[in-house]
Amino acid sequence: MEFIEVKNLHFHYDSESHAVNDVSFGIPKGSYTTIIGHNGSGKSTIAKLLVGLLELESGEIYIDDLLLSLETINAIRNKVGIVFQNPDNQFIGSTVRDDIAFGLENRCVNPQDMEEIIVNYASKVNMEAYLDSEPTKLSGGQKQRVAIAGVLAMQPEIIIFDESTSMLDPQGKEDINKVIRQLHKDQNLTIISITHDIEEVTKSDYVIVMNQGKVAKVGKPSEILLDEEFLTSMQLDVPFAVKLCYLLKKKGVEIPVTIDTERLKEELCRLNLKK
């Protein structure tokens, strides 16, 4: 069994349509998995089901061999943290330090140990200089870093990012994605990212594509992102590098279709020098 195992999951918000319809998938321990799909495809609903914020109608969710139920939900929530789209919805404290401390207080962590924990996890997201700042006065990217630090301080084994970069500008989005990738590398966390960001998808280990409440396809980024026809049918963006590869091929330039943007840059430079 995988570290996270979802079997025949069903959920709907009303009686007319299923938000999640017979969804099954597995996620290996320590992997970085992105879940993509058009708006309303069910991907954010899955995130909330995984942490028990919504009650599934039928099916099974296993986290580290624990079946999600009323009896195990607290144990599972100790293993899983979630970072939402809008960090303002997660702020509790009047300062960054207070906000990171909130979850630790709920876990009854010894107050004498808290400061070291707070500074440690604030430093992992480069926010240690802002511990006495008011969260409301931070930039969007800084707020999201604080939200991540608060989750990290709880020492989960799994972190779910529910469209956590969608409200940021391109620079803020790239900064947070770098933080996520570094955390995955350094902390050996299992990462699940609900995202529209195709560039982030290229850096993940596995991709789950959702469509109309169902799993449309599962695979590695290279298997998913190079299928231009499939992505278009799913109303998803085709990566710029892939579009460029196909355009070059149509012009008679024989370059392997890859998602390696550096290789494409080199090829374009070579063609330009030939002119």
Image (cartoon, rainbow, N blue to C red):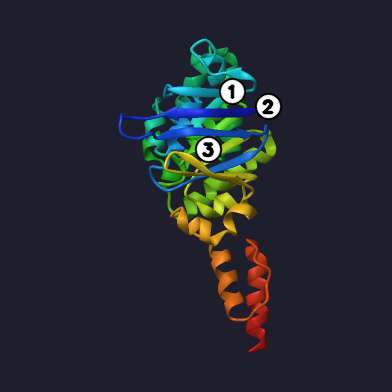
Q: Amino acid at mark 2?
A: Met
- The residue carrying pointer 2 sits among few (fewer than 14), some (14 to 19) or many (20 or more) residues within 10 Å by Cα, namely few
Which residue: 57% across, 15% down? 75
Q: Secondary structure at mark 3?
A: helix
The answer to whether 92 appears left or right of 110 in the picture is left
Measure the C-alpha gap from mark 3 to mark 2: 42 Å
Q: Position of residue 154 (x, y in %)?
A: 56, 23
Q: Which residue is mark 2?
A: 1
Q: Is residue 237 above or below residue 21?
A: below
Which residue: 52% across, 61% down? 229
Q: Secondary structure at mark 2?
A: loop
Depth check, front residue: 173 or 203 = 203
Q: Position of residue 174 (x, y in %)?
A: 53, 52
The N terminus, quarter of image: top right
Q: Which residue is mark 3?
A: 129
Measure the C-alpha gap from mark 3 to mark 1: 39 Å
Which residue: 63% across, 81% down? 252
Number of numbered discs visible in the structure rendering: 3
Label 3 vs 1, first from the N-terminus = 1
Q: Amino acid at mark 1?
A: Tyr
Q: Which residue is mark 1?
A: 62
For residue 128, which quarter of the picture? Answer: top right
Label 2 vs 1, first from the N-terminus = 2
The answer to whether 163 appears left or right of 207 in the picture is left
The C terminus, quarter of image: bottom right
- The residue carrying pointer 3 sits among few (fewer than 14), some (14 to 19) or many (20 or more) residues within 10 Å by Cα, namely few
Q: Position of residue 109 (x, y in %)?
A: 56, 14
